[in-house]
Each structure stands twice: as C-alpha cells, then as structure tokens.
Image (cartoon, rainbow, N blue to C red):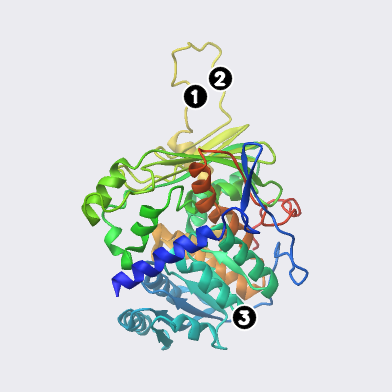
Amino acid sequence: MKRSISILLATLCALTLFASCKGDKYGYKLKGGQVVYNTPARPADQQSMLGFACDPIENVRVAFVGLGMRGMEAVRRYAYIDGATVVAICDLLPERVAKAQDALKKSGMPVAAEYSGEDGWMELCQSDDIDLVYLAVPWQLHTKIAVYAMEHGKHVAVEVPAATSIKECWDLVNTSERTRRHCMMLENCCYDYFELTCLNMAQQGLFGEIVHGEGAYCHNLDPFWDYYQGDWRMIYNRDHKGDVYPTHGIGPVCQAMNIHRGDKMDVLVAMDTDAFRGQDIADKRYGEGEYNYANGDNTCTLIRTHNGKTILVEHSTVTPRPYSRMYQLMGTEGLANKYPNKGIAIGMETPDSLGIDDLDAEKYCTPAEYKVIMETYQHPITRAGGLAEKAKEVGGHGGMDFVMDFRLIYCLNNGLPLDQDVYDAAEWSCLVELTEVSIRNGSKPVVMPDFTRGEWNKLDGLKLAE
C-alpha cells in the first residue's frame, strides 16, 4: 500500500510540472533573459472572484477529507465552533475514519457520514448535504480534489500549499470563477496573534509605507519525515528544487503589502545551495547513491512588486536550526520583526552624537512599550467576543488554527467575503513551481503570472470583513 501511494504521488508530481513547461498555454518562454509566463484571457463563462461573497449559510455543513495529523486536529477544533456541523469524514484508511468518528462522539457532535478507500473523496463530493469540503491530504492531491469538489457545488478550504504547479494554480482560479464557489487556502500563519496585530499596525499607518517584507519556513523536519503517509513529503523534496513550501512565510507579508489589492508581485529570482545534508538524509533513508536529492539545504527567493517593494522568502527543512518564519515588515516609519528576536521599532530618534562604531543606539521598543503597542493595536477580529482567549484555550499552533477556522465559518455564516480568496491561494502557491524554474534556468528572473488577469488594483487594500 505505501509503495503504491509513493509511486502515484511521484507520478502526479512529474505530470503537473511537465504540464507547465514551455509551449503549454499556462507555461513560459525565455525572453530577454527572463522566464516569462503566460497569462491567458478569462473565458467568457467566468467572472472575477475579487470581493466575492456567497449567500449566508446559517449552519455550514462541513466534510473533512484527509484525517492524518492536520485533518484530525481540525475535526477536534470544529467541536468548538458554532454555526458549523461536521457531516462527513473521509480518509484512504478506514481506521482513521473510525478514529475521527470516535473524536466526534466524545465531543458531543452527531455521527458523520463515513467514506474511505481510493475513491471515497469522490463519493463524498457527490453528496447533496455538504456546503464546505475541508482538505488535509498530501499536497499532490490538493488541486485534483478541490476542483472536483467545486465542480460538484461545494466551497473548498484546502491545506497549504493549495497547488504545486502553475497549471494547478490556474485550475483552481478557473474552477472557482466558473462555479462561483469559494476556494480558500488554509494559511494559518496569517492568523498568528503577532502577524494579525502587525497587519493592523500596518493598515493604521504605524510603519509608514511598507517597503520590504520577509518570510520563511525554516523548520528541521528530521523528527517528522516518517509521519507522512507513503513518504510523500520526502519524495517531493527529493524530486524537486525550489521553495516547495512557501506560503507560511509569504502569506502574512502579502496581506500587509496588499498584494492584488493595490500591488502585485512582478518578478522573482530564486537561488539555492547544494543538497549537502539533504543528500546525507536521502542516502541514509534509501541507500547510498540511490537518489540524487534535488532540493537544496536552503532556498532564497527575492521578489519585486509592481509598486517597487521587495519580499525575501526562505525555505530550509533539513538543517539543525531553530524554527523560524523570519516574519518582518520594514516601513518608512518603523519595523516589526518576529524571529529570532520579537520586537517593534517605531518613532526612534537618532542621538545628536553617534559614533560610527555604536551599533546599539537604535533599539526595539522596551518590553513595557511593546506590551502597550500590542494591546492597543490588537486586531479587531481577535478582540471581538474574546476570540484570542478562546483560541488559546482550544489550541492549534498556539491558537492561530482556531482563529482561521472560526473566521472561515463566520464569513460563510454571514455571507461575507473570505479573508483569503482563490487568488491568494494561487499567488502564494505559485512559488512552488516558479522558484524551481528560476533555479533550473540558472537563477534567471521569472515574470510572474497575474492570476487576477489585470484586476490586481481593483480593490483598495485588504479588508477583513467584520
């Protein structure tokens, strides 16, 4: 069973990347020293999803597909969310479905319909009593199942990254536009307390004009590789270069910088190290010399936006280092930084006399000042109804997972635009392929596709509906 899953996922990886190569309508060509991606015209039967809101759903009937680490935790969290009912659960393995059913019973929730096996997700999507399909399956299956669910009238919430190729990104955008169904990527890091508070500060002008942002996924996965069924995550890293997991880092930065809400990412350049430790891990895992491990130990991506801003994104999962998402916002009036030193720096005055060797003159706010700032600028959505406190109680990466789930259901209950739309899902996920293409073409600049098809400045900034 595990070997067949591995073969299937490896084949899907190869097919999706091949589908976006030169000559494909969603592919690219080399032009003027750059990799230039096509942006196809919107078909006549599609409409933009910018600002889209569906009719209010008083009780959201939720179905979970994928009941591994992320899926089971989400099922547990939904017991604490009013306005939603878990009506169906699905996994390849029946024993996981049974475990999730037990969790629902212990939480006092009604029994859910059960689906399992290789085609279980298709049967689930065909059901008429489901409003939202929540996907926590391997990356390589995200788009395939999300598209099928939308085509069968379901809204979709899909784990990160939502897609692994440019073709898949366009599949999500086109299907969402054609079916008028939400497709939200479950980027939980956008709901971290620090990131949300800094987003509010940025929108209140505390940092002045945001000119540069940084984000990353630097997480030593040595203890976790064996948890991924069929070895799917290691296989993807083994076979692909580039930033294969970019959304935790880039998502919160894009929100603060109003990407496709007044600005857009224009061009990127990616560069990686050789696979020093990655190759050692592959040799120990599969046998020495069995595979050439593709992904570099560290990948750096630099992006320039249409409005002249820059974004730096990094990826590292094989080196022994402290966890970091590197989150930083740099503005004309101040700075926010989370890793390795959490702090806010605003309104600093330069001393009258400053020696050239005095590198400690400009400092972060004092702990007392920091506390006041964070309390003053707490984001309204976490302040309302004591959501921040409840999130800490329920948990999920410190509570940000619960805030994410709560907001998704709140917006659906009230017929509001979601915090993240399908264009966010495509823009943040497209780095998976674009960084690999840049690296494999000698770190050439890549002109990024515009998934809004020219409507990136139609909305005036990010607004989280209340």
Query: Disc 3 marks which amino acid?
Result: Gly
Query: Disc 2 marks which amino acid?
Result: Thr
Please name whichever residue, 222 or 157, is drawn nearer the observer in this view of the structure. Answer: 222
Disc 2, SS = loop
Label number found at residue 350: 2
User: In the rendering, at what x and y percent does residue 362 appear?
Assistant: 49, 24
Q: Which residue is mark 3?
A: 153
- Do residues under tags 2 and 1 come within 8 Å of each other at their CB atoms? yes
Please name whichever residue, 289 or 356, is drawn nearer the observer in this view of the structure. Answer: 289
For the question of whether residue 460 can be seen, the reply is yes
For the question of whether residue 197 can be seen, the reply is no
Disc 3, SS = loop
Q: Mark 1 to mark 3: distance in Å? A: 55 Å
- Mark 1, other Cα within 10 Å: few <14 / some 14–19 / many ≥20: few
Disc 1, SS = loop
Please name whichever residue, 361 or 117, is drawn nearer the observer in this view of the structure. Answer: 117
Q: Mark 3 to mark 2: distance in Å? A: 59 Å
Quarter of the figure that contains the N terminus: bottom left
User: In the rendering, at what x and y percent does residue 230 appear?
Assistant: 32, 67
Q: Earlier in the sequence, mark 2 or mark 1?
A: 2
Q: Is residue 247 above or below residue 204?
A: below
- Do residues under tags 1 and 3 come within 8 Å of each other at their CB atoms? no
- Mark 2, other Cα within 10 Å: few <14 / some 14–19 / many ≥20: few
Instruction: Kindly indicate the quadrant of the structure image that contains residue 153.
Output: bottom right
Instruction: Kindly give the residue lying farthest to the right in the view shown.
Output: 44
Q: Mark 2 to mark 1: distance in Å? A: 7 Å
| Position of residue 203 in the picture relative to residue 252 (left or right) | right
| Position of residue 406 in the picture relative to residue 286 (left or right) | right
State which mark lies toward you, 1 or 3: 3
Label number found at residue 362: 1
